[in-house]
Image: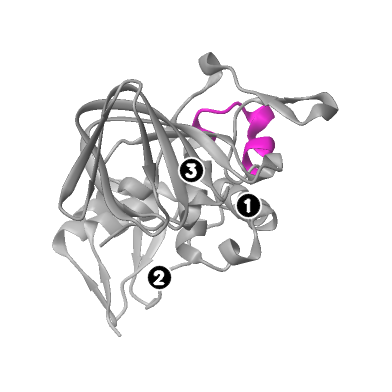
Amino acid sequence: MKILISAETVRQARSSGQTCLPAGKNVLITPEARGVADQLGIRLDPDSNELPAPPITQDDTQMASIRAAVLAKLPADVACRPELVEQIMSRVCSAQKNTSPATLSQTATSAPAAQGSVAGATGIKLVKGADVHLGVFPGAGTDKQVGIADVITAADGAPIAAGFMAWSQCFFPWTLDYDEIDLVLEGELHIRCNGQTHIGKSGDVLYIPKGSAIEFGTPSAVRFFYVTYPANWQGGVVST
C-alpha cells in the first residue's frame, strides 16, 4: 500500500519531534511536502517505506492514566459502551483544562467530575452556586458550545444526578435513557418532541420521560438546573 506524505504530514512530524520521514518507492510525496520538509529541516529517507511511530508524550501517558481511572469508577454497563466512555473522557479533558495540577487526579477519578463538598458523616452535600464552573458538553456536538456541570452524581452515593447547563442560540438532538426534570433559571428552554415545541421560561419546570427523542435548544440563551433518574444519565445518546 502506498503512503502519502503531504505538507500537513510533514508539519505534524515536526511538531512531534521527528526529524526524518520515508521517501522510498512505496511513498508518494507531494511537491508542497518536499518544500515544507526542506524548510523545517525534515530529512526524506529514500531507503525507508514506513512512517515512524509517533513518540509517546507525557500527555499520552497522562491520558492513559486518566482513562484507566475513569474506567475503574464506571459501572460495567457504561464501561462497555465506547461512545459513552468517549463522552465522559471529553468532559474530563474539558474540566482538566480549567483545573490546577494539584486537583487533576481528583477530577479524573470523579468520572464525571462533580462539584461541591460532602459535610462529614451526614452524607449531605453542599454545592455553592458561585463555585460552579461549566465545562463543554461534547454530546451536543463539537461545533456547539453547550456548557454543563454535574454537581451530584452516582459517585456521591445518590440514586439521582443533578447539575447545571447553559448555552446560547443553538439546538441539538438527544434521546433520553432516563427521566429528567429541568428548572429554568434564566432565558428560554425549548424542547421539541413529536412535532411540538414546549417552551420553559424562568421559574418553569419541565419533565421529560425516559425514552423521549427530543431536541434541546434555545433561540436566545438559557440556563437551567436539571435532575435525572437514575444517576447514570450518560445513558442518553445523540439522536440521529
Q: Amino acid at mark 3?
A: Arg
Query: Gap in Å between the C-alphas at discs 3 and 2?
Result: 32 Å
What residue sits right under mark 1 in the picture?
70
- Name the chief secondary structure element in magenta: helix
Element assignment for label 3: helix
User: In the drawing, what numbered circle is on residue 51?
Assistant: 2
The magenta segment: 96-109
> For the point 40% across and 51% down, which residue is it?
209
- Comparing 57 with 175, the one in front is 175
The answer to whether the residue labelled 1 contacts the one labelled 2, judged by CB atoms less than 8 Å apart, is no
| Residue 58 higher or lower than 77, as above or below | above
Q: Earlier in the sequence, mark 1 or mark 2?
A: 2
Could you tell me residue 221's position as x and y percent?
24, 25
Crowd rating for badge 1 (residues with CA inside 10 Å; few <14, some 14–19, many 20+): many
Element assignment for label 1: helix
| Residue 69 higher or lower than 116, as above or below | below
In screen coordinates, is 180 left or right of 96? left
What residue sits right under mark 3 in the picture?
91
Could you tell me residue 222's position as x and y percent?
29, 27
User: In the drawing, what numbered circle is on residue 226?
Assistant: none
- Comparing 142 with 64, the one in front is 142
- Comparing 164 with 62, the one in front is 164
Image quadrant where residue 167 sits: top left
